[in-house]
Amino acid sequence: MYIGEHVGVETSSNSRSSSIDNRDSTPAASEDSTCPKSEKKEEFTLQLKASPKTGHAVASRWTIQSKHSQNRASGDHNAVRYSLLWMAPFFSGGGYCSEAISYVTAVNAGSKGTSKVPKLGISHYADAENLNFWKGLPSATRQSLFSLTSVPIDLAGAVVVCHSEPGAWYPPLYLTPPCPPTGYDDPLYIIGRTMFETDGVTPDHVRRCNRMDEVWVPTQFHVDSFIRAGVAEEKLLKVVQPVDTVFFNPAHLQPLKLLTSNRLFGSTPNSPSKPFVFLSIFKWEYRKGWDILLSAYLQEFSADDNVALYLLTNPYHTNHDFGTVITEFVSSHSIPKPPSGWPNVYLHDQHIAQSQLPALYAAADCFVLPSRGEGWGRPHVEAMAMELPVIATNWSEEAKRKGKVARLDMVANYAQEVVARIVVEHLVRIQAKLDSGTSFNTSTSTVTTG
């Protein structure tokens, strides 16, 4: 986990002497940037890993060690023999973060009837770290991720997954560790995992996608839109996103007590019965359609209705004063106030631990998010796994079924063990492709921690 002193993490004496944020150690590069093998530095980033128990940072250095030969692995062609390095914003708390954690958790656990990857390592890149998110993960998840950051990976015998928006792929357009770590020559095979919320892809991102051996996207919508933009059709594969249907399971779960302290509109409910709770979870940006949601809710309901809307949001390159923005929006758009008064609207803009999310969903009666576009819609599928009805924009591809039927669909098609099997099958396919005659590099590199 890349946690430096800039977020106030206590570091060990060893790391303090060289406590640099590794995002500053890799300058942004243009698309034409190159990194000749003769010029590669032996040590190119510094990783500060936080202990899952204390949160204190411990120095761990990535190094590149040169070798001069590679032997093609032999053995069972139906089992994965190659190592897997998965690079993603694992500790950011964003959408790519949640997706990446669900993938590596599923693959690391293996699945019935499939072989586990013999060696899986992970590395954080492409976004800032969020210590509150890390601390809020379930303990078992923290322990698993922490151990995976220490696994040494031989790039010459590895498949590398670059899991982010393409601007972070080698060479990155902003300050972040590169993925693949040493460029495109050393790994056996390179997979880009990405998605977009729109029906178009920028020319630069098309070029970056076409440099990958494969590009995995979550829906057929993305396959079609990427092909239209110019990404080579043979590189694209639909690989769905997993959801932890064991973690997000409404059975035997105590609902979270919803706070009523930060009420933006409405008044103390008069009804003795529990209100019908609409829940919306989103990062604060125009794309998420918070303005559409508020307009519709405030015009549909009034204080006479025993309802409540809970907005759980967090900043996305913006300030935190969401309450003022919301009240000013309502005033400026002249939404008529009902004679009986506004329906209740509550804002929660503080961090909620990942471990509390299932209980939060369990406290709601319906999930609603009329966003202007979604790459996948992770809160939608989490809500469906929790058997909640979902109100969502009918656009893109996923998140269309509701309630108990939706949970059955989630368990059957998107559970972690199901997607783990899909990923392993693709790795076996890639392995067969490599074994069938793909030329191998004459020099190799090893990524290690120590």
Image (tube, rainbow, N blue to C red):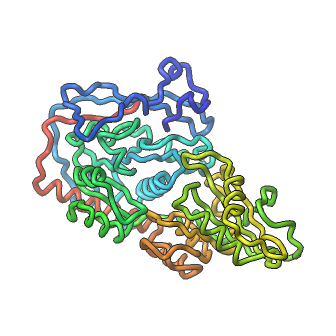
Residue 379 horizontal/vertical position (percent): 55, 64
* Residue 169 visible somewhere in the drawing: yes
Report which quarter residue 273 is drawn in: bottom right
Q: Nearer the viewer, residue 165 or 74?
A: 165
Q: Position of residue 190 (x, y in %)?
A: 26, 50
The vertical placement of 63 against 399, above or below, is above
Residue occupying the point 73% across, 66% down: 255
- Residue 5 lies, in percent from the top left, at 56, 27
> Is 363 situated above or below 328?
below
Closer to the camera in the image, 112 or 311: 311
Q: Residue farthest to the bottom?
A: 405
The residue furthest top is 17
In front of the other: 420 or 288 = 288
Q: Residue at x 52, y 46 (%)?
A: 92
Picture residue at 67% right of the left edge, 52% below the top: 322
Residue 224 location (% of width, % of height): 30, 69
